[in-house]
Image (cartoon, rainbow, N blue to C red):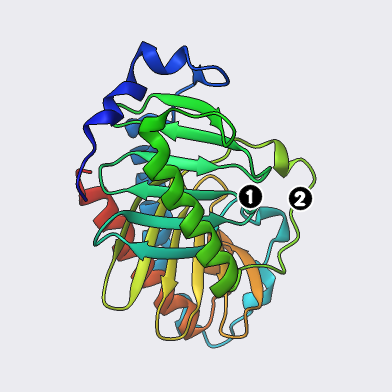
Amino acid sequence: MQRNGGYNEVQGQRHTRIPGASLHLSQPPRRECLKGLLVDLRSQLSNLKRAKPSHRHVIRQGEAEDPTCIPIFWISKWVDYSDKYGLGYVLCDDSVGVLFNDSTRLVLCDDGDTLQYINRTKAEFLLNLRNYPSALSKKITLLKYFRNYMSEHLLKAGANITPRDGDELTRLPLLNKWFRTKSAIVFHLSNGTVQVNFFQDHTKVILCPLMGAVTYIDKQCECRTYRLSLLEEFGCSKELAGHLRFAHNMVKKLLARKR
């Protein structure tokens, strides 16, 4: 992606003086915190892998289900234009984000107006669609294009999950990292969630290290949330166990990546 020298305007004090724009003083979670959550998740999945949950004589996967651990946020749609611009995505609350190739981020909240821009130094700026610096015009145009494309052409993953009361008050996470393999795309959110979407069967696993839980969206788009510690105890299907082994390897790859 060709970088626009004008982006520097919105990284300093000039940006904060634009009417309707303000510097958001709270910072995204520190890299050390996110790494710690990944280490926790790697440990949780390692314990499950050692337990060989699909090798039980009697598997009682349903006993491991815990609906109170459903994720607050996950990526419900995505589109990969990283050959030119970046990756666009929609969160489950219908907010829209783009992680650009220059490592900046732009998020349009679910109200359809409030914008959050994060520059390369991780400083956050609050704007809206009615008033933003001209240096961001191209990126906002791209965000609108991604939003319209995903709205018109893509189905919403996890549409039948009912959010808990109070979840709407939780801070909106950013897309921290993502990468593709031959068989899946992997997302890492700034709240610690790791999501793996499998290409062949369209199943998905959404892993939360804070809850020690996994939400599995199966081939029929049915969603179930399980505690990883209870899957160790009660076992699970070969299909889910295989997906969790793959996710374990992806967590290790995330830990090995420097960016």
Element under label 2?
A: loop
Q: Looking at the image, which is closer to me, 104 or 175?
A: 104
**What amino acid does circle 1 point to?**
Ile
**What amino acid does circle 2 point to?**
Arg
How many residues crowd around disc 2 within 10 Å: few (fewer than 14), some, or many (20 or more)?
few
Q: Which mark is residue 188?
A: none
Q: Is residue 14 above or below residue 169?
A: above
Q: Residue at x 55, y 17 (%)?
A: 19
Q: Residue furthest right?
A: 165
Q: Looking at the image, which is closer to me, 242 or 157?
A: 157
Q: Quadrant of the C terminus?
A: top left
Q: Residue furthest bottom?
A: 57
Q: Looking at the image, which is closer to me, 179 or 195?
A: 179
Residue 18 in percent (x, y) is at: 49, 17
Q: Mark 1 and mark 2 in contact? Answer it, CB < 8 Å.
A: yes
Q: Residue at x 47, y 12 (%)?
A: 17
Label 1 and label 2: CA atoms lie apart by 8 Å
Q: Looking at the image, which is closer to me, 232 or 89?
A: 89
Q: Where does label 1 land, which residue? A: 72
Element under label 1?
A: loop
Residue 38 in percent (x, y) is at: 37, 47
Quarter occupied by residue 136: top left
Residue 45 in percent (x, y) is at: 41, 60
Q: Where does label 2 land, which residue? A: 164
- Does residue 76 appear anywhere in the picture? no
Q: Residue at x 50, y 83 (%)?
A: 56
Q: Is residue 132 left or right of residue 181?
A: right
Which comes sooner in the sequence, label 1 or label 2? 1
Q: Residue at x 19, y 43 (%)?
A: 258
Q: Is residue 122 left or right of residue 215?
A: left
